[in-house]
Amino acid sequence: MKPIYKLIGMLLFLVGAIVLFMYYDVHGNSTYVLSKRAIRVGSMLVVGMSVAYSSIIFQTLTNNRILTPSIMGYEAIFILFQTVIVFLYGDKSFKVLSQQQNFFCAVLFMLLFSFCMYMLMFGKQRRGMFYLLLTGMVLGILFQTLSQFMHVLIDPNEFSIVQNFMFVSFAKMNTKLLSIASITLLGAVCYAMYYAKYLDVMSLGREHAINLGVDYQKWVRRFMLIISLLVSVSTALVGPITFLGILVTNLTYEMFRTRKHVGMLWIGSVIACLCLLIGQFLVEHVFSFSTTVSIIINFIGGVYFMYLLWMSRKKVS
């Protein structure tokens, strides 16, 4: 099947999933129910596109199919930020920081962390990509350890506040945050699509890209900033979701066997949105909110991650 037909089929499937999610089991005040569901659908579309774009671009830059931006420690620093707020102010944290202020502070904190990381990589010494990944992974473990230490010290009743941020939730969304995230996503998507031709060349490897006339360091720096912005906004919007990127990117590679990033980014976005919609539908109508969408996706993504490791092991042997 031609890629364009695959994309059209996936888009029709996505529209069907949105309609099913919006109108399934609507009782009582339908206007109120549909308005709340529309906000959740919008947030899932924003997060799905952010995860797909950031993960595909990140794997192109690292030339690795099992790495996602979460290895850089963004999720760990988000949890640390929320833990510190609760640790300092307790159950009064909502009075100190509103939902909008919390969102902006979390995004700013993660972007500041990214800026410091990139200064190490793109400074005078010009360290390589794997140095950046290793540094991000070590700092992520450090932040996670600090968060766990403070979790022990926090009052159990106050820990429930932190726990709400540790899992993806589309129920706490409001239109103002969704509008801000949508504008940010639109700018990042337009930039990535316009310069996707450089990703096609960079996927050949650093040496080949430089030989073909691409300023490799400049475009790595620019695309890493786009990744930081997308991951920061999506994580601050709904919370961390680790294995969605691995699941989406590798399904995209299987369905769209080409190195043209314009098509891969769109198909990846559709697959990510479908995963979130189906997962949230199961949470609401099958499990009756007894679990979260992040647990479902992380379980499926974790199993798929183990499958990828097993297949790569077989290829090596």
Image (cartoon, rainbow, N blue to C red):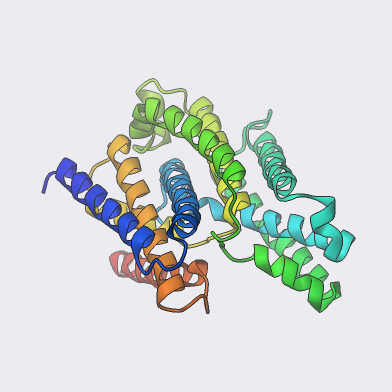
Residue 286 vs residue 124, the one in the foreground? 286
- Rendered position, 111 above or below 159: above
Image quadrant assignment for residue 162: bottom right
Residue found 70% across the figure and 54% down from its top: 77
- Rendered position, 259 above or below 12: above
Q: In this view, does 234 lie to the left or right of 30?
A: right
Image quadrant assignment for residue 278: bottom left
Residue 220 vs residue 270, the one in the foreground? 270
Image quadrant assignment for residue 221: top right
Q: Is residue 134 left or right of residue 79?
A: left
Q: Position of residue 126 (x, y in %)?
A: 62, 32
Would residue 128 be seen by someone viewing this image from the given angle? no
- Rendered position, 33 above or below 306: above
Taking the view exactly as shown, the residue that stands out farthest to the top is 213
Taking the view exactly as shown, the residue that stands out farthest to the left is 1
Taking the view exactly as shown, the residue that stands out farthest to the right is 88
Residue 228 vs residue 14, the one in the foreground? 14
Q: In which quarter of the image is the C terminus?
A: bottom left
Residue found 77% across the figure and 72% down from its top: 159
Q: Position of residue 227 (x, y in %)?
A: 53, 40
Residue found 82% across the figure and 58% down from its top: 93
Q: Position of residue 180 (x, y in %)?
A: 58, 38
Would residue 90 be seen by someone viewing this image from the given angle? yes
Taking the view exactly as shown, the residue that stands out farthest to the front is 29
Q: In this view, does 314 lie to the left or right of 127?
A: left
Q: In this view, does 117 lie to the left or right of 32?
A: right
Q: Position of residue 203 (x, y in %)?
A: 36, 38
Residue found 31% across the figure and 61% down from its top: 20
Residue 192 vs residue 317, the one in the foreground? 192
